Amino acid sequence: MKAKIALISAIIFALTSMYVAVSKAEAGTTIKVYSERQPFLIKPLIDQYEQNSGNKIEWIFSKKGLVQKTILEKDNPVADIFLSADIARLIDIAEAGANVDIPIQDKVPTNLQTQDWTSLTMRTRVIYAHNKLNLNEISYEDLILPEYKGRVCTRSGFHPYNVSLFSALIAHHGEEWFEDYIVKLKANLARKPQGNDRDQIKAIYAGVCDLSIGNHYYYFKMMDDPNQKVWLDKVSPIFPNQDSYGSHVNISGIAIINAKNYDASLDFLEFLLSDEAQEIYANDNNEFPVNPNVSASERVQALANNAKFDPIDLQEIASNRKAVLDILQKINYDG
Ligand SMILES: [Fe+2]
């Protein structure tokens, strides 16, 4: 009799848990995310969100073309959200009218959001220098000095990270100045632009060049990678332009691109700005949180050492992008 009761309760228990599992899955919404970045960077955030909300995140990754895809699909969107590692892509989407307005977020400084998109994190474009140069100070403008002829490496000038930096240079100095600058920068290159940010640091380590430009968080990614850590024996990041307008800052951000799944999408967006999620961004990704309640990780703070950041408006940077692309093309920067 006892065994029978145990068996029956076991069956009831199994049925109840099955019911709970099914109803939970039904309650959850699937939020589709377009991203040009691999999901692993933000995986801890997705896991946390799925656990908190019962919603599911479906990650659609492609290395290229998602902005164009979003714009083509704007009347019948496939994805709900566009996650971007750069301001330019968010502006392209907004200019094409492929996004849905979002409320102004009280957790984000006003200069880092519009009703079209909001920033999630900030990243600095620093200069990586060979330690033998013994530099404490350097500026983006210094990269064209004659003494650095054949000693600079960069990735493609057309990569959004560089386009954003170059757009800021136009904002500070004007187009004519920039055209002269970029010709001289090309003349100072040790090799044709190639690879990603980390490949430039590898090239400094390998003796190909002495200076490069890269985002600050790659320093920590290399430090945490047993194969890349050794590069940092010879190379150090410097926050540029501390004697002038400060180091260039770009953002990662988010736009909602589908009205149909709006509530769930906004819920995910607000989660990414929560103290909890911003802590994960700060500590796992070593980016600067936009939410002022959350500080950068200790090691980021130690590296940045209260560095001054360029306060220029992101919209102004965005407005110079076309001029940058035209000049890069004209002088064939990558060729
Ligand atoms: Fe990156």
Image: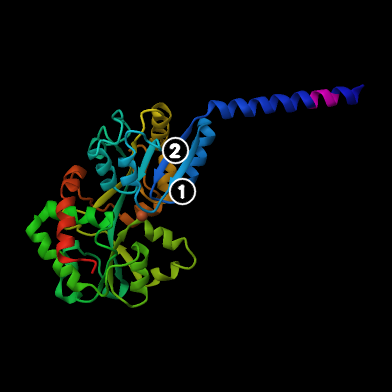
What secondary structure is found at the residue carrying circle 2?
A: strand
- Mark 2, residue position: 32
Packing grade of label 1 (10 A; few <14, some 14-19, many >=20) is some
For the view shown, which residue lies furthest in the right direction? 1
Image quadrant where residue 169 sits: bottom left
Quadrant of the rendering where the N terminus is positioned: top right
Quarter for ligand 1?
bottom left
Q: Nearer the viewer, residue 40 or 305?
A: 40
Give the spatial CA distance, label 2 vs label 1.
12 Å
Residue 205, position as x, y percentages in the image = 36, 74
Q: Is residue 165 visible?
A: yes
297 in relation to 212, above or below: above
- Of the residues tagged 2 and 1, which is closer to the observer? 2
Q: Is residue 127 magenta?
A: no
Viewer-closest of 71 and 114: 71
Q: Secondary structure at mark 1?
A: helix
- The spot of residue 252 in percent (x, y) is 33, 46
* Highlighted magenta segment, given as a residue range: 6-10
- Looking at the image, which residue is at 30% across and 48% down? 86
**Residue 247 in view, yes or no:** no
Q: Residue at (28%, 73%) from the top-left corner?
A: 210
Provide residue 241's location: percent of width, then percent of height. 19, 58
